[in-house]
Image (tube, helix red, strand yellow):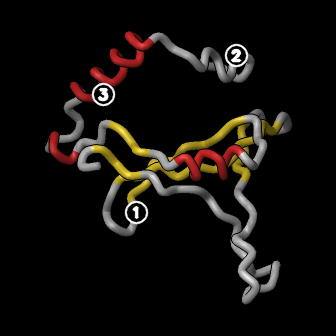
Amino acid sequence: MNEETFPGPIQIPLSKGQEWEERYVDDNSVEDSKKKVTAFLIPRETLVKVLELKTEAVWAHLGINDDKEKTLIFNGAEYDPSTGKYKNVYGPPKGEKSKSEAEAEEVVYDGTRPSPPF
């Protein structure tokens, strides 16, 4: 995919989606199939928060949380024509009154749970 055609088709036929899922399931790069994540349960609130950033795109980064679960971490993305790449756009600080604005840390969005087991 190139930037001229990004994002490309955002709707794909169900049969194509099933083919992609099957390809992932059949991938043998993970030795223990019981540990292989095949989907993520994403809370609506996570999607709403990242969409409130009103960016032209969204990054979904793979990570492992503190409970040792695979997770997706979301933040906004805006195209930077000077670099030809998408830059990260983070959410505003939580607004904790105990921290000064300079100390408040930008946020990303999670809440996802891997399946299996969820």
Q: Where is the N terminus found, in terms of image quarters?
A: top right
Measured as percent of width and height from the top left, residue 58 is found at 65, 40
Q: Which residue is mark 3?
A: 24
Query: Does the residue at mark 3 contact the one at mark 2 (Cβ under 8 Å)?
Result: no
Q: Position of residue 15 (x, y in %)?
A: 38, 10
User: Rounded to the nearest whole Å, what is the CA distance between mark 3 and mark 2?
Assistant: 25 Å
Q: Quadrant of residue 57?
A: top right
What's the distance in space between the residues labelled 2 and 1, CA to CA? Answer: 33 Å
Disc 2 designates what residue?
5
Taking the spot 33% from the left edge, 58% from the top edge, the residue there is 69
Question: Label 2 amino acid?
Answer: Thr
Q: Which mark is residue 48?
A: none
**In this picture, residue 109 sits left or right of residue 39:** right
Q: Is residue 104 above or below residue 8?
A: below
Q: CA distance from mark 3 to mark 1?
A: 22 Å
Q: Residue furthest front?
A: 44
Q: Residue shown at 41%/18% (left/top)?
A: 17
Mark found first going from the N terminus, 3 or 2 = 2
Q: In front: 47, or 23?
A: 47
Q: Which residue is mark 1?
A: 65
As helix, strand or loop, the secondary structure at mark 1 comes to loop
Q: Are marks 3 and 1 in contact (CB under 8 Å)?
A: no
Between 84 and 11, the residue placed more toward the observer is 11
* Callout 3 amino acid: Tyr
